[in-house]
């Protein structure tokens, strides 16, 4: 099963500790979202427990994990996220497809920033 989201709300926030890139559907009464969070500071205990790097979450914390993203691809005006086996298990979906409405420059900025932070742990393909 794929998770498909028509994102009408998009945010990109960065501070000293984290980058948060989020997409949401503004439909009333329905909390559908996808959040990508990347730690900017690394602490040894987090690294040992695999709690650093890119965190992905959809709709609720119970559907979230670290080391869940294999690749992020921009295909035309949508984003496809390929998950690792861990991501598939924790998020309970096979693949994520986000269609931002409309595509805005902050999305390109967020994807470029994730690519810069990836360090080979996941792939980011920009068109």
Image: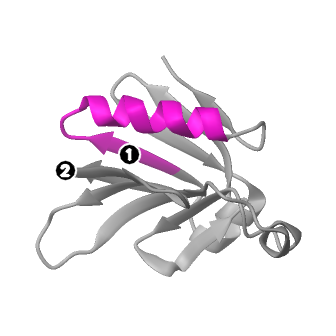
**Are there few (<14), some (14-19), or many (20+) residues within 10 Å of tag 1?**
many
Give the residue pinned by disc 2. Answer: 8
**What residue is at 82 percent from the left and 66 percent from the top?**
47
Residue 92 locus on image (x, y percent): 58, 70
Please give the name of the residue rendered at 74% of the width and 65% of the height, measured from the top-left corner.
86
63 up-or-down from 97: above or below: below
The outermost residue toward the bottom is 62
Residue farthest to the left? Answer: 28
Image height of 48 relative to 108, above or below: below
Spatial separation of the CA atoms under disc 2 and disc 1: 10 Å
Depth check: give the residue in front, 36 or 101: 36
Image position, residue 41 (x, y; %): 67, 58
Magenta-colored span? 96-117
Q: Nearer the viewer, residue 41 or 10?
A: 41
The answer to whether residue 66 is seen in the rendering is yes
Where residue 23 sits, quadrant-wise, is: bottom left
Residue 47 marker: none
Secondary structure state at the residue bearing disc 2 = loop
The residue located at (77%, 67%) in the rendering is 43
First in sequence, mark 2 or 1: give its number: 2
Q: Which residue is mark 1?
A: 98
Residue 33 percent across, percent down from the top left: 35, 64
């Amino acid at each position: 099963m794929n998770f498909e989201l028509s994102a009408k709300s998009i945010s990109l926030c960065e501070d000293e500790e984290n980058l948060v890139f989020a997409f949401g559907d503004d439909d009333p009464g329905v909390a559908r979202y996808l959040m990508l969070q990347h730690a900017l500071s690394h602490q040894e205990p987090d690294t040992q427990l695999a709690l650093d790097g890119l965190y992905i979450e959809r709709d609720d914390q119970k559907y979230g994990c670290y080391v869940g993203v294999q690749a992020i691809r921009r295909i035309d005006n949508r984003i496809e996220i390929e998950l690792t086996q861990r991501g598939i298990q924790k998020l309970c979906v096979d693949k994520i497809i986000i269609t931002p409405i409309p595509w805005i420059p902050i999305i390109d900025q967020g994807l470029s920033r994730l690519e810069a932070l990836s360090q080979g742990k996941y792939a980011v393909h920009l068109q």
